[in-house]
Amino acid sequence: MADYKPLSRKAMAERIARDIPEGWYVNLGIGIPTLVADAIPTEKEIFLHSENGVLGFGPAPDPEHIDPWLINAGKQHVTLRPGGSFFHHADSFAMIRGGHLDLCILGAFEVSAGGDIANWATSAQDSAPAVGGAMDLAAGARRVWVATEHTTREGAPKLVETCSYPLTAPAVVSRIYTNLAVLDVEDNRFVVREMVPGLSRDALQAMTAAPVFFEEKEYA
Amino acid sequence: MADYKPLSRKAMAERIARDIPEGWYVNLGIGIPTLVADAIPTEKEIFLHSENGVLGFGPAPDPEHIDPWLINAGKQHVTLRPGGSFFHHADSFAMIRGGHLDLCILGAFEVSAGGDIANWATSAQDSAPAVGGAMDLAAGARRVWVATEHTTREGAPKLVETCSYPLTAPAVVSRIYTNLAVLDVEDNRFVVREMVPGLSRDALQAMTAAPVFFEEKEYA
Amino acid sequence: MINKQVGTTAEALSGIADGSVVMIGGFGSVGQPDALIEALIEQGARDLTVVANNAGAGRVGLAKLLDAGRVRRIICSYPRSSGSVVFEDLFRAGLLELEIVPQGTLAERIRAAGAGIAGFYTPTTVGTILAKGKETREFSGRLYVLEQALGADVALIQAWRTDRIGNCVYRETGRNFNAVMATAARTTIVQTCGMTEVGGLDPEAIVTPGIFVHRVVHIPDGEAAAPAHLKKEEV
Amino acid sequence: MINKQVGTTAEALSGIADGSVVMIGGFGSVGQPDALIEALIEQGARDLTVVANNAGAGRVGLAKLLDAGRVRRIICSYPRSSGSVVFEDLFRAGLLELEIVPQGTLAERIRAAGAGIAGFYTPTTVGTILAKGKETREFSGRLYVLEQALGADVALIQAWRTDRIGNCVYRETGRNFNAVMATAARTTIVQTCGMTEVGGLDPEAIVTPGIFVHRVVHIPDGEAAAPAHLKKEEV
C-alpha cells in the first residue's frame, strides 16, 4: 500500500518553524501550533505572543525551573526570552485585533478552499462550545496558517469545499501545513506546494474533499 | 456701595479645598481650579488626576526642584506624591469617561440653572476653539463643580437661565463656587448655600441672571 | 489617612447582594483570586451572574461556587475544559445560563465598561454563528459587529503587590483579566500576595492605580498564593 | 538578529509619502519628538494630515512644519494656545483644514485604530455642537455618540529608553499620546533618549512592546531630550 510516512506532530512543527521569517510576531494556537515554540532555534529572533498577556516567550522550561506565574494560552509553562514583556488581556487582544501579529497558526477541524476555518465547535447544536481566543486571532492576525492532520482519525478529509462545522472566521487561511503536505489557499483553491516523499498526487487528492492543484515551490 | 469683599482666587481655591472629602479622586481644570492643588493640606489624602497621565500629583515644586517631565494638563510643573502613578492618554481618559473620578472642578464662561456648562467656545461661529479635555471631564466625572468669578469683568452674570455660548455638556454641574457665593444646582434652580459677609441677597440676585433661592447650609 | 486594606476576606466580601454581577479575574489558575472565591461561597450571595474566562475546573474555586447553586448565569469564553465537570453537569441539566463571548471581545467589553464606552464595533465573529442577532455594519469596506460594554457590581482580583491606597502590580501572566476587570466594577476587591508601603511601587510600573480599587485583603505569598495548578490537592 | 535602530533621523523618516497621515506624540512640549519633526521638515513630504493634541507653538517644531506649508489638515483637541500664531494665521487664511476632537475622544479613536476597533460609542459631546452630524444612540437610558477609529501612516514618538527590538518606556508625563499613537500607525518611528540592551527593560514595566515599533533613532539625553519649554530659545 502506501509507501509514504506522514510527518509526526513534532516534524510538522519543525517544518512550520523553518518558514517563519526572523522578526515576525507570531501567535501559536493550541495543539500542533504550540509545538512550534520548541522548534524555533534560539538564535532566530521570532517573537511569540500569547493571548494571556506575554510577548517574547520561549520554549518550555526544565521541570526544575518552572515558574508557576508564566504560562501560555494553552496553560502550559513557558519561559521568557530577553526583551519579553507582559500586559493585560485587553492590551493583548488589541495587538491581535489591531493587525499587529504577522502570523497566527491555528489548529482546525476543517478548512475550506476559500480559506474558511472551523476550529471551535463541532456542531451548531453544541450550545456550550469553548471559543476562547480563536475568533479574535482568526479575524485579527495579518496571516492565518493552519497546522493539522490531513484527515481525522477516522480518515475523513479536513480540507473541504465548504465547512460543515460552525466557522471561526471566513476567508482568512492562507496556508495549511498537514502531516502529508503544505498547501496554499489561492483564488479559492488548494494549491499543493510540497508533499511527503512517496505520496502520490492521486492519494493526496483522495484524502482531500476539494480539488487540489499542484504547483510545487519552496518558500523563501 | 457694597461693603462686602469678593474672595480672591486663592481664597476661592481654599474654600473649595475645604469641601473635598479625604479619599476623593479629583481632576482640576485650568484657571481657578488649578489653584486648588496648592490649597490642599499635605496630610489630607486627596488624589489629584491630570488628563496628561498622572494620578496623585502634588503642589508646584520649588523653582530649583522643577522636573521638566512632570506637568499637569495646564502645562504647569507639578510634583508627584508617594503612591502616584503614570499612564497614557487613553488610560487617563478611560478613568475620566468611565466615571472613576469623584469630582472634576472646571472653570466656566456660563452655567445654567439646569446645570449646563459652557466653558470652551465663546461663539458657535468660532471655528477653531480649543476644547481639550473639557467635554470628556464634564461628561465623565461623577460630580462637576464649577469655580468662577460670579460675573465677567464687564459685570455680566455668568450664572444664567440658559447658556448663550456653545455647551461643554448639558445638565452636569451640581455646585458652583464663585467669588461671592457657594450655590448648588438643584431641581433646575440655583440654591445659595453661603455668601461672602456683607453681601445682600438682593445684590447677589442682581448679579445672577436666573432666580436664586436661599437655603444656607454647611457642607460636611 | 486612607486605608483600603481590610483584615479578613469576610470583611472584603461583605455586602455583596443576591443577583450581583461578579467578575472573577485570572486565566486558568494563574492570577485567580482563590481566597476571595472561597469567601464568596461563605458569604452566601445567590442568583449571581459570573463573568470569567473559564467556568471552573475540578470541585474547587469557581466550580465549587457553581456546585453550591449560587450562580444563575455565566459569561465566559472557554467554559469547557479538562475538568469542567461541575459546569457541564449544571449546564446539561438546564440549571445554568451561559453566554459565550470570544476572549478578545470579552476583554474589550469589560474594558469598555471601565472606560465609559457603551459599545464598539469589532471584526471578531463576523460571518459566524456568534454574530447572530447582532448589528453588523461596514466601516471602510470591512464588516464589524456591535458589542456592548460589560460591567459588574463586584470584581474579585488577584494582585502581586498592593499598597494601602490600592495601587497594584501583577506578576508575569497573572496580569491577564485582573487588570481589566479591576476597572469595570462598582466595587473592586483585591486579594494581594503582598502589601507594600505607599511609594513602594514604581510609579512607572503601577498597572492598576488605586482609583480602581476599593478593598484590599492580604493573602500572603507562599502556598496560598501559588497558582492552584501547582498545589498538591489538584495534581 | 533584528535591529530596528537606524543611525540618523533622515533614515528614520525615509519613505514618508506626500499625502500621509502623520501622528505626532507629546503633550505640550513634554514627550514631543522634536528631532523627528525637524527631520520631517527636511524630508519634504507635503499635503500631510497631522494628528496631534496641539497645533504647535512659536515658530519651531510642528509650527515650523505648518509654516513650511506641508500640512493640509490638522486633527487635534487644542489648536489655539499661547503662541499658536502660525496655526492661527494659516487657519484664518483658509490654508489649513481643522478637525477639533475632544482630547479623550482623540485618544480613544487612536487607541481604537491600534486595537482593530472600527468605532465606539462615547458620552462625550452629547448635547454639544461637536456631536452635530454624528450618529447618537441610546444605551441603558443614556445617549452616546458614535466615533470612528483614527489610524495613521506614520507615528512620530518620543520615548525615554528603548532597545534594538523596539521595546519602549517613557518618562513620567512623557507617556501621554506617545504610547497610544505608537499602536495606531503603519510605521511607528521612535526618537529615544537612550538605548538599552535587549533585556535591560523590566518586562513588567514595558509600556510599548516592540511589536508596535518599526524604527528607532537615538537622540541622546541632555539638551536635545529636555522638553522644549525648558530650552533657552523658547523661554
Image: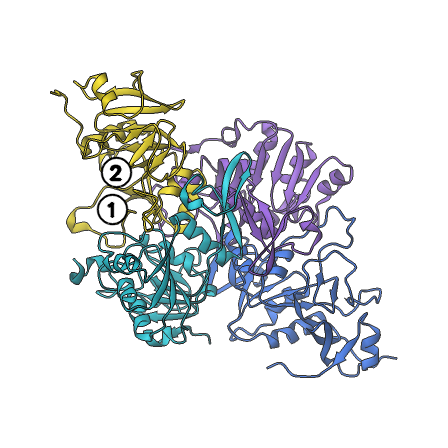
Chain colours: A blue, B yellow, C purple, D cyan
B159 on left or right of A192: left
Local secondary structure at mark 2: helix
The answer to whether the residues at label 1 and label 2 have Cβ atoms under 8 Å apart is yes
C162 on left or right of B219: right
B18 on left or right of A157: left
* Local crowd size for mark 2, using a 10 Å CA cut-off: few (<14), some (14–19), many (≥20): many
Look at 23% across and 48% down and name the residue there: B77
Return the chain for callout 1. B
Look at 37% across and 40% down and name the residue there: B168
Mark 2 residue type: Ala
Look at 46% across and 31% down and name the residue there: C7
Q: Is residue B125 above or below residue B21?
A: below
Whichever of callouts 1 and 2 sits on the residue coming sooner in the sequence is: 2
Q: Is residue D190 visible?
A: yes
Reading the image, the residue beneath label 2 is B37
Between residues D213 and B128, which one lies in front from this camera angle? B128
Residue A151, image x, y percentages: 79, 68
Mark 1 residue type: Val
Q: Is residue C201 above or below residue D33?
A: above
Q: Quadrant of the C terminus of chain A?
A: bottom right
Residue A3, image x, y percentages: 83, 81
Reading the image, the residue beneath label 1 is B78
Q: Is residue D78 above or below residue D137?
A: below
Q: Is residue D207 visible?
A: no
Look at 20% across and 46% down and name the residue there: B61
